[in-house]
Every structure is written in C-alpha cells, then in structure tokens.
Amino acid sequence: MKWFGALLILAASTWLGFAAARVLHERPRQLRQLKAALRALEAEVMYGHTPLADAAMHLARQTAAPLSELFERFAAALCTEETSAAEAWEKSLRTVWGKTALKQGEFEVMKQFGATLGQYDRLTQQRQIALALAHLEREEAEALDNQARYAKMAKSLGVLAGLLLVILLM
C-alpha cells in the first residue's frame, strides 16, 4: 500500500512538472499565432477592404483555439451588440485570456491595440498593427528564452520534488 501511495505522489508531481513545461512551450506558439492573425487582419483591412466584423470571422476560422475564440467573440460582439470596436475587443479579450498561455504583458499590448480598432484611417490602423507586432515580437523572444531556460528544469523539478516527498514520507 505504501508503494502505491509513493507511485501516486511521484506520478502527480511529475504530471505537475510536465504541465508547467507545457505552458512554457505553449506561450511562444500562441504568440506566433497571434502575430500571424494580426498580419492577416492587416491584409484583410488594408488590401481586402473587409469590414472589421467579417475580417474577425475569417480570422476565427483560420486560427487555432483558444485564439480563434477571441476573434469569434469579437466578431459576434460587433455584429450583435451596440458597442464600439474597442469595447468589444476588450470584452472578448478578458473573456478568452484565461484560456491562453499568454501573460500580462501580451494582454496589455493587445488591449492597447484594441483601443485603436476602428477609430483611425487605414494607414494609421496599419501603423498600430505594426506597433503591436513589434511588441509581440519582443514578447516572443522573451518567451522563447524562458522556454529554453525553464522547460527542462520544470520537468526535472516535478520528478525530483516527487522523489523528495516520497523519501520524506517513507
């Protein structure tokens, strides 16, 4: 019975370590998706002259979850509610953000970007997208650095913490 408990503790701590490492791996991937979505939004608005709600629906279909949900909620809010694009963006952002692996820095960048949505002409909007992309580029570099630095450590720490706990309890 002791061994079963020890294996259970070891498995749980290992699982926690691998879950922490998965978050570190997921953040750069989601940042790349977000940057690609912003580039696609820029192309839709600048060159396709697509309305913002339609462009957001196109992005929702092209982007993987959970970011697809962000654009889906944004498009729905623009179509159904009497609200500004900035308010709809922030509301969608707050609703979906907890499901992502992204951090507060990215949230602030996207919130500032959303505050400019639909308020300026196409050229200024293009500059705002470029600014958001530059900030996200910096955040991605940081995320990749953190992934390289801490992912393996998180896995090892999960296993070793479980072993330590098993040893202490035996």
Image: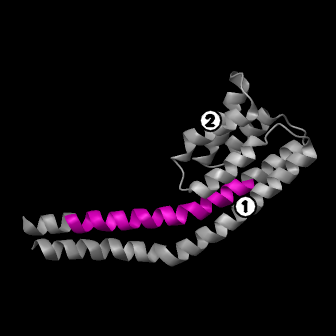
Q: Which numbered circle lies on residue 89?
A: none
Queried whether the magenta region covers residue 62, the answer comes back as no
Quadrant of the frame with the C terminus: bottom left
Cβ–Cβ under 8 Å for marks 1 and 2: no
Of residue 151 and residue 104, the one placed in the foreground of this image is: 104
- Residue 133 location, x and y as percent? 76, 58
- Residue 44 location, x and y as percent? 84, 44
Q: Residues within 10 Å of mark 1 (few under 14, many from 20)?
A: some
How far separated are the C-alphas under marks 1 and 2?
21 Å
Report the residue at 54% width, 51% height from top.
100
Above/below status of 59 relative to 155: above
Q: Which residue is mark 1?
A: 135
Quadrant of the frame with the N terminus: bottom left
Above/below status of 144 relative to 102: below
Report the residue at 23% width, 75% height from top.
163
Q: Which residue is mark 2?
A: 91
* SS of the residue under disc 1: helix
The magenta stretch is 9-36
Queried whether the magenta region covers residue 15, the answer comes back as yes
Q: Amino acid at mark 2?
A: Lys
- Residue 165 location, x and y as percent? 20, 71
Report the residue at 56% width, 38% height from top.
95
Main secondary structure of the magenta stretch: helix
Q: How many marks?
A: 2
Left or right placement of residue 18 versus residue 13 in this view: right
- Residue 47 in view: no
User: Where, by quadrant of the figure, is residue 52 drawn?
Assistant: top right
